[in-house]
Image (tube, rainbow, N blue to C red):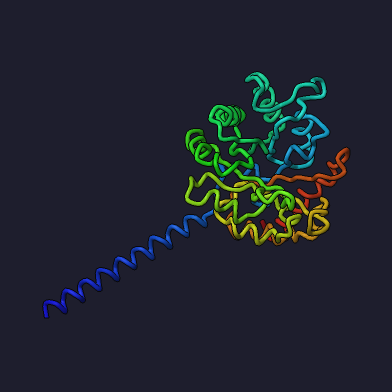
């Protein structure tokens, strides 16, 4: 009898232990699926999302003009990128993480003037070199951005994680399209991006360029589901066809099913930001880029957002 009691007792303990493991695993999976929430006030949101241009959309113009244009087109936030000319009166000055504190303050004064919030900086290189990575994060801290957008190597991720923790600035891993002639370029694949951040600080995630996903033959909603819980931002673009020949078009006129993309972001409770990136009609793309923001407003009105 004593042996039977011991066996039953052991079985019960084992069962309880397994239940604890299942519960812990479920809680961990649920935590991983919780959407990243950037500290962006509701006043900077459109239809529940923080929306504004990626300044690269206006790369024929200057930082000063991009900020003014962001406000004119109805954007509330902006993602700045390295190397853009500073202003019409100083076209030879390039704005990036090597500029002086005085220039950073000048740019932040323009952002305040137009009430535009800087959310991300990139796409910028983050090599496995502490001095260089620290320079970027120092710059981001002074500029007041919430995340750094980059396409880092797997080897640099430990160092970047240290910087993310030290500066409390997020990492957003950006993707370009698949490169058939370069099998070592893997960041086009959302599964690979997920493998880069799994088990790491929750402030490390993805800047999903859905236009490049479509150029890689991927459905945007499928990619968003793969990266659920790790989405920091989107580069939101519609294209006219799947495949590497796809060209940017106004949202809702391409193959991307942008309404379904926004529905999926809403389902996930996405708390990052949407960068409108429009790489077409470069010299006069403000009307088209503005229509993309209008599409999001229209989606919000139709969904009661």
Any part of residue 151 in sight: yes
Question: Looking at the rendering, which quadrant does residue 1 occupy?
Answer: bottom left
Residue at 77% of width from left, 34% of height from top? 66
In this orientation, which residue lies closer to the viewer: 218 or 116?
218
For the image shown, how many numbered marks are present on the structure? 0
In this orientation, which residue lies closer to the viewer: 199 or 253?
199
- Residue 46 image offset from top left, x and y in percent: 68, 48
Q: Which quarter of the image is occupied by the C terminus?
A: bottom right
In this orientation, which residue lies closer to the viewer: 134 or 70?
134
Question: Looking at the rendering, which quadrant does residue 132 occupy?
Answer: top right
Question: Looking at the rendering, which quadrant does residue 219 occupy?
Answer: bottom right
Residue at 63% of width from left, 40% of height from top? 149
Residue at 71% of width from left, 26% of height from top? 95
- Residue 217 image offset from top left, x and y in percent: 74, 59
Relative to residue 25, is residue 118 drawn left or right?
Answer: right
- Residue 78 image offset from top left, x and y in percent: 69, 38
């Amino acid at each position: 009898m004593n042996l039977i009691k011991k066996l039953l007792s052991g079985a019960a303990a084992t069962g309880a232990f397994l239940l604890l493991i299942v519960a812990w695993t479920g809680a961990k999976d649920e935590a991983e699926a919780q959407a990243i929430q950037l500290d962006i006030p509701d006043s900077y949101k459109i239809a529940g999302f923080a929306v504004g241009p990626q300044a690269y959309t206006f790369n024929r113009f200057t930082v000063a003009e991009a900020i003014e244009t962001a406000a004119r087109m109805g954007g509330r936030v902006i993602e700045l990128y390295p190397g853009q000319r500073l202003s019409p009166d100083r076209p030879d000055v390039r704005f990036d993480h090597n500029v002086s504190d005085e220039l950073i303050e000048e740019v932040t004064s323009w952002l305040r003037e137009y009430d535009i919030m800087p959310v991300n900086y990139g796409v910028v290189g983050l090599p496995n070199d502490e001095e260089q990575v620290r320079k970027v994060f120092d710059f981001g801290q002074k500029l007041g951005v919430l995340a750094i957008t980059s396409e880092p190597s797997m080897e640099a991720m430990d160092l970047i994680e240290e910087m993310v923790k030290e500066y409390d600035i997020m990492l957003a891993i950006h993707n370009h399209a698949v490169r058939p002639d370069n099998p070592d370029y893997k960041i086009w694949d959302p599964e690979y991006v997920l493998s880069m951040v799994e088990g790491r600080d929750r402030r490390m995630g993805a800047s999903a360029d859905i236009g490049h996903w479509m150029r890689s033959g991927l459905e945007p909603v499928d990619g968003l589901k793969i990266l659920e819980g790790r989405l920091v931002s989107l580069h939101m673009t519609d294209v006219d066809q799947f495949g590497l020949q796809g060209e940017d078009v106004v949202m809702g006129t391409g193959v991307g099913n942008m309404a379904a993309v926004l529905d999926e972001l809403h389902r996930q409770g996405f708390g990052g930001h949407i960068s409108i990136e429009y790489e077409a009609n470069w010299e006069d793309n403000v009307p088209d880029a503005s229509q993309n923001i209008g599409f999001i407003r229209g989606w919000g009105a139709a969904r009661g957002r």
